[in-house]
Image (tube, helix red, strand yellow):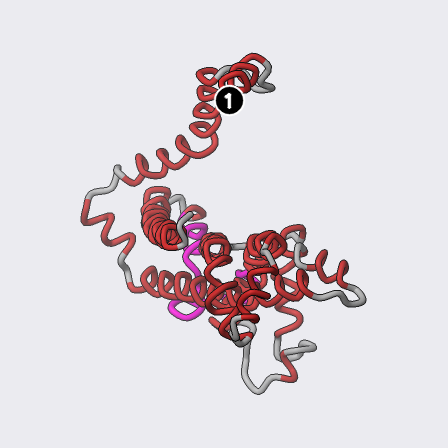
Amino acid sequence: MLLSKTLLKRHSVLPGFDLALGFAVLYLSIVVLIPLSAVFFKTFTLTWSQFVDAVASPRVVASYQLTFGASLAAALLNGVFGLLVAWVLVRYEFPGRRIVDALVDLPFALPTAVAGIALTALYAQNGWIGELLPFKVAFTPLGVFVALTFIGLPFVVRTVQPVLEDLQKELEEAAATLGATRLQTFWNVILPTIMPALLTGFALAFARALGEYGSVIFIAGNMPMVSEITPLLIITKLEQYDYAGATAIAVVMLVTAFVLLLAINLLQAWTRKRQGR
């Protein structure tokens, strides 16, 4: 063991720990920490009353409710159906399986504006899908939910799929031998094993939905107090040269998203601890 560690230190592809750590911190600082710090520093130019007026006006609060509510609902739906899609792709062989597998990544490759236009054309009242529905989807909060579901599905599928592929089928066979039903096997054997990956996919889909802009603005309708998302409000304030107001709303989004993701990560850690990992 000691010899292998020594050889690894001598023949490592990357430079020494100190130099590698320095490059990593520098890169993260340039790409992540400095831009985020600039957002906070710009917000600090506001007084407390100005900050409250910027982030707590009725129009902004309504956008919070829509953005966080639709993002959460879309992530939950993707958690269920993303698991189902991953299960089908891993456990079943059928004609066109590779094509379906490739289509899962389409929201990754498709420009968000193109996705928004396509969804609007499909779900408008004269669209292929919209004309068949008894209710309106495009230009309503429901349209926002549809767009966020579309862009978030691959995160769940691609996170859960590798775990399902590595899952030992002997565990399921042992449960069946002991008399467990299929539902009991899934609930007590499979679900606890894939739960950390499922929570990770949910968190990624939720975080992605919070900041989504391009695919939403076309199908949302962007009506204040009805179907206006928070990222659009930030863009609107930037166009009005209200940089401090825009960064104030961004700070609220950033802090709230961080707290929610931290809670999800703590839940993941608790789940792994229960499983003895």
| Residue 252, percent from left and from top | 32, 50
Compared to residue 220, the image places residue 129 above or below, namely below
The answer to whether residue 231 is magenta is yes
Q: Which residue is mark 1?
A: 1
Q: Is 110 placed left or right of 29 in the picture?
A: right
Q: Residue at (56%, 53%) from the top-left corner? A: 159
Q: Amino acid at mark 1?
A: Met
Of 108 and 196, the residue lying toward us: 196
Q: Residue at (41%, 54%) from the top-left corner? A: 275
Seen as rendered, the residue at the extreme front is 178
Of 94 and 253, the residue lying toward us: 94
The answer to whether residue 16 is magenta is no
Q: Which residues are magenta?
A: 216-237
| Residue 166, percent from left and from top | 60, 52
Q: Is 137 placed left or right of 57 in the picture?
A: right
| Residue 139, percent from left and from top | 53, 71
Compared to residue 2, the image places residue 246 above or below, namely below
Q: Secondary structure at mark 1?
A: loop
